[in-house]
Image (tube, rainbow, N blue to C red):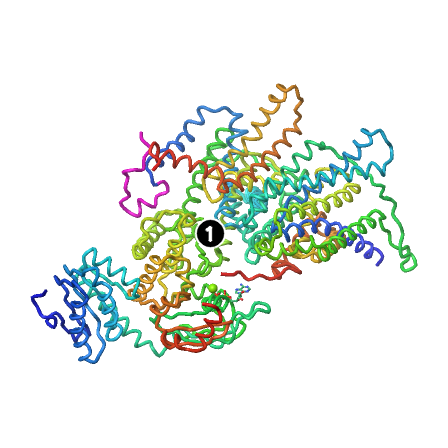
Amino acid sequence: MAFFLETLLGGLMSGMLYSLVALGFVLIFKASGVFNFAQGAMVLFAALAMARFSEWIPAWLGMENLFVANLLAFVVAVAIMFVVAWLIERLALRHLVNQDGATLLMATLGIAYVLDGIGQTIFGSDIYKIDVGMPKEPVMMLESVFEGGILINKEDFIAALIAALLVISLSIFFQKTATGRALRAVADDHQAAQSIGIPLDRIWVIVWCVAGITALVAGIIWGSKLGVQFSLSTIALRALPVVILGGLTSVPGAIIGGLIIGVGEKLSEVYLGPFVGGGIEIWFAYMLALVFLLFRPQGLFGEKIIDRV
Amino acid sequence: MFYRENGQFKTSYKADQQVFAIPQDRWAIFALVVFAFVGVPMLVDEYMFRAILVPFLILSLAALGVNILVGYCGQITLGAGASMAVGAYAAYNFLIRVDGMPALAAILLGGLMAAAVGIVFGVPSLRVRGLYLAVATLAAQFFCDWAFLRIKWFTNNASSGSVSVADISLFGWTISSPTDKYLFCLGILVVFSVMAKNLVRGNMGRQWMAIRDMDVAATVIGIRPMYSKLTAFAVSSFYLGVAGALWGFVNLGSWEPAAFSIDRSLQLLFMVIIGGMGAISGSFFGAAFIVILPIFLNQMLPLVGSLLGLQVSIALVSHVEFIIFGSLIVFFLIVEPHGIARLWATGREKLRLWPFPH
Amino acid sequence: MTDRTHSERIIFHDAIETMEVDFSSMTFADIAQVDAVYDEIERQLTATGQRWFFLVLYTDCVIAPEAWDRFAARGKSANVNHGRGSVRVDAKAETREAIRERAGKESFRSNIYDTRDQALLALGEMRKRQRDLAKGADEVFLRVDNVSLRFGGVKAITDISFEIKRGEISAIIGPNGAGKSSMLNVINGVYHPQEGTITYLGEVRQQMSPRAAACQGIARTFQNIALFKGMSVLDNIMTGRNLKMKANLLQQALWFGPAQREELAHRAKVEEIIDFLEIQHIRKTPVGRLPYGLQKRVDLARALAMEPELLLLDEPMAGMNVEEKQDMCRFILDLNDQFGTTVLLIEHDMGVVMDLSNFVVVLDYGKKIAEGTPDEVRADPNVISAYLGASH
Ligand SMILES: Nc1ncnc2c1ncn2[C@@H]1O[C@H](COP(=O)(O)OP(=O)(O)O)[C@@H](O)[C@H]1O
Ligand SMILES: [Mg+2]
């Protein structure tokens, strides 16, 4: 029982991280209809920037303080992600307005390649550390309830907390602020939004910036856990089933989908994996999403659309 | 000889429906094929065959498959590598498990098996479109990656996880030298290209394009989306399966699942985008481009670097390759969604009317 | 003016229910001459007390431009009051053009043939079709009963019933958003209504499926042109033949043999349609490059390639200039006449609707507010207020 709970909690926590990446997808899709395959590349790019600047800045300034270094690096990384967002809008998306979804998707594949290439050219392609002072030691919890308690990784716990915080603040941003409402208006109807004077291109830059920040946070959390390396860009692939499950247009969907996939992956790996040779979590999530798609093509929370002719 | 259409009137629908309606085109293609079979083997060295021509031929075949699905039927796929893997491993198993199985038959059976699997993974396309479908095809990709790595039966319990095939032979012709391999692959490619062209210019191709361009209108004139999409998946996977089997049997000789990973899928997709979606010739252009560019960069970048006094590492070359591929994808999607094939066609059109543009 | 009296030029062939009028070598110089001839024709027709097919010979007939409008109007009114359809023989180029133009403007069918024999043959077909229609009259061709359709909370159609007769041209009119397009979509199975039934060719259904509709001869065009934009005009129209093509995948891949024969046979048929709609010159053009009016015509061509029993046209003339509209009118009338196709169309131009159709259904806010002949509908107070209310 305790073991099951442990697995479950582990699943929930990694699920929270998936939600974070999925959120990046949903934000961009909602506002611009772009299925952003480059989200993973953005995570890698952001994490690389963070890792390298937190190394370089102390060296340049000749100081030792880890916190200040990290803070400065974070600020620089945010700035870089804004520039990236702006460039993407300027150079690619602006010229692809009104193209169909598949074309946009392929374009973001191209963008992903460019980001991967540039990121590694500038920042290098080794494995780098991000040390933001996350506690590494595991803790026991609920010792009173179960014999021996359950073992939880403090780092995971904090990461999940940060992710949850970000998700909540983004939801508030969407619901309460003027910009957020404008974003939602754009999402509902591009033409209408344009006609009441919402500047589409600016909105898109903003969305990409926000997505850039979520990428940065995800990159930091993941990077501090596993190290910053090329494989980080594949976490987008891990988060895709989440988006499918939750529906491309739903923020709550992204969160719940992330949790379901996180838990499903862990449970399947632990309880099913041994029978089929292990390593199944990567496709299991996809299969889960796929089976789900067959019954609800629009995802958990997506709206059903009947084509107009 | 003048390259002119003027004055050549078609006298029947049959003449009008030929693949190359202009005799000059027909002759040029014919000459090209003859040259490929006879001239090239006399002119080219082994390195050229091994590093460029054989991969180019096989990847062209694979790109044809992807083009049928993505370019003609409009169903995006990120799982092309999986179909190649199914083809390769199925062919391998047919070859080693069935006594006296001819290699060519094994390759074709591999293709058929890929088609069958392709149909299964095409089923989501009936319910979901575009973006969601891309994800569904990724599922196929990851599942196949896993299955060929972990299920030992597929690899005949090879301890290293990699399988190998000795030189294959065809009606007593042992295909061992690079020239043999080249001719073998060329033969298959020519036959398959002709069949692909026939399919896309006929009823089936029109149904695919109808589904691609406007699926509601297509169903209203009686096209069954399920049938059209699944045939596209089947035909496409068949091509990919055969290409996968060739890639394993002929190009690599021994291989691991990584040979057909998601990188391969993306590479194939890029070939089709750059080469030209919805054009048979686009598959060849794309494959040529993708095969040649890395080789070209590998030669050129260090040269350029040494001129500038910079040290160009192998890693840098591969990063530059990424950047170039990525930018070209975006560039072509924005500027010419029909890729190199369209640029070529436009150029030829100009030539056709030259020197009188109107 | 003439060497024969007017009455000598009029012959009644009782066996084939046809009145033959011989205008050969006649000259209509002014309105008075037109009236003189047509007064005589109408007198004789009235005397018979029945309806006739008209066979009109135009060999070397000359009609002065100032007489044309009168000529067309009298011709049309004769047909409306006493006619069952007309065929024309051997009009000279300018006369032929003028007839075509008037046919578009005044909404009658041009039906011009080179020889009398050809015209008689066409007449025979026409009679046969009308006989068949009379025979099948008791079978319901198309009827919708109490159909309601909702999208979430939006009621697109509420409890609508009407019936369409075989061989007629009917129209649905109503302000924007009234549910007209949705109605067509229900009939050919693109939308599935929550309530009600659709009866087509005697078969009652809860909902149609697009494929079943297509197989049973329902074709349609779209309000916002839904052509296959990556294909040429020819390929677009060929796609309309897909249900009739039988070669299997392997045969198609190999091309020679059955696949090629089939392709050629259907190509010939498609060429007929291309000729009929006068779009020979754009055969090979990608549809995306065509102007709007021609795209609409290609849309119609694709639908015709299915050789439909019932043709649904969603605003076939929207966005067209006057000339294009006239052409389109002529095509609709001609295809109704020559192929016996039943037509149900949506159109905003009231003039066109009144001229073309035998029967009109009026929708407003998803409800049926009137139905009947064009004249009845025009006089209906509900319709008047709906149209005034919608600022038409
Ligand atoms: N596919 C659809 N999804 C949602 N609402 C629709 C759809 N098609 C039509 N509607 C709604 O149904 C109503 C009738 O539309 P329509 O039939 O297109 O009107 P009309 O053709 O008479 O202008 C409108 O309010 C429209 O918004
Ligand atoms: Mg409408």
Residue at image location 46% in from the left, 52% down from the top = B208
Pick whichever, B208 or A224, lies toward us: A224
Pick whichever, C85 or B187, lies toward us: C85
Say whether mark 1 is within 8 Å of ligand 1.
no
Span of residues in magenta: B1-20
Question: Is C261 situated left or right of A237 in this image?
Answer: left
Q: Work out whether A29 lies above or below B161.
A: below
Q: Please state which amino acid type lies under the numbered disc 1.
A: Trp
Q: Position of residue B303 (x, y in %)?
A: 60, 21
Based on the picture, tell me whether residue B234 belongs to the magenta stretch. Answer: no
Kindly identify which chain the residue marked by label 1 belongs to.
B
Q: Position of residue A102 (x, y in %)?
A: 56, 49
Q: Position of residue A35 (x, y in %)?
A: 62, 49
From the image, which quarter does the N terminus of chain B lie in?
A: top left
**Most extreme residue toward the left, as rendered?**
C3
Task: Evaluate whether residue C238 shows in this view.
Answer: no
**Most extreme residue toward the right, as rendered?**
A144
From the image, which quarter does the C terminus of chain B lie in?
A: top left
What residue did someone put label 1 on?
B208
Residue at image location 8% in from the left, 68% down from the top = C4
